[in-house]
């Protein structure tokens, strides 16, 4: 009897088992130094974006104060 897509043969079971084993191994691996570097870069990029946003807000409020005459550095 020929195997069809609906009837998995014994080879497909072995293949799926091998894939499951490989997948479990990959998930269990500890992060590499490359992963650590990418995580650090991502964290630094978020921090820079937050600092830019804070700086933009502070310039925005300083500009608002300057127009209202309440700027701490009126000339």
Image (cartoon, rainbow, N blue to C red):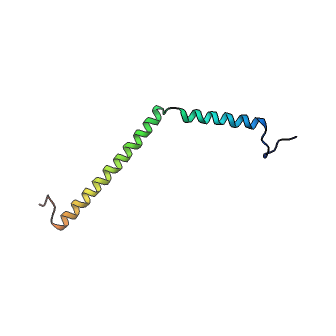
Splitting the image into 4 quarters, where does residue 36 fall?
top left
| Residue located at (47% from left, 36% from top) | 35
| Residue located at (82% from left, 41% from top) | 3
| Residue located at (41% from left, 43% from top) | 42
Taking depth in this image into account, of 36 and 59 the one nearest to the observer is: 36
The C terminus is located in which quarter? bottom left
Please identify the residue farthest to the right as the structure is shown: 1
Residue 59 vertical placement versus 21 (above, below): below
Position in image of residue 37 (x %, y %): 43, 36
**Residue 59 appears left or right of 26:** left
Residue 26 vertical placement versus 60 (above, below): above
Residue 64 vertical placement versus 50 (above, below): below
**Residue 4 appears left or right of 62:** right
Position in image of residue 23 (x %, y %): 60, 36
Taking depth in this image into account, of 13 and 38 the one nearest to the observer is: 13
Please identify the residue farthest to the left as the structure is shown: 75
**Residue 29 appears left or right of 62:** right
| Residue located at (26% from left, 60% from top) | 60
Position in image of residue 19 (x %, y %): 66, 36
**Residue 48 appears left or right of 6:** left
The N terminus is located in which quarter? top right
């Amino acid at each position: 009897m020929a195997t069809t897509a609906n009837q998995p043969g014994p080879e497909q079971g072995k293949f799926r088992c091998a894939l499951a084993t490989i997948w479990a191994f990959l998930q269990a691996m500890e992060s590499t130094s490359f992963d650590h570097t990418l995580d650090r870069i991502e964290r630094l990029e978020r921090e820079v974006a937050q600092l830019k946003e804070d700086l933009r807000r502070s310039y925005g409020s300083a500009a608002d104060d300057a127009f209202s005459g309440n700027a701490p550095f009126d000339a």
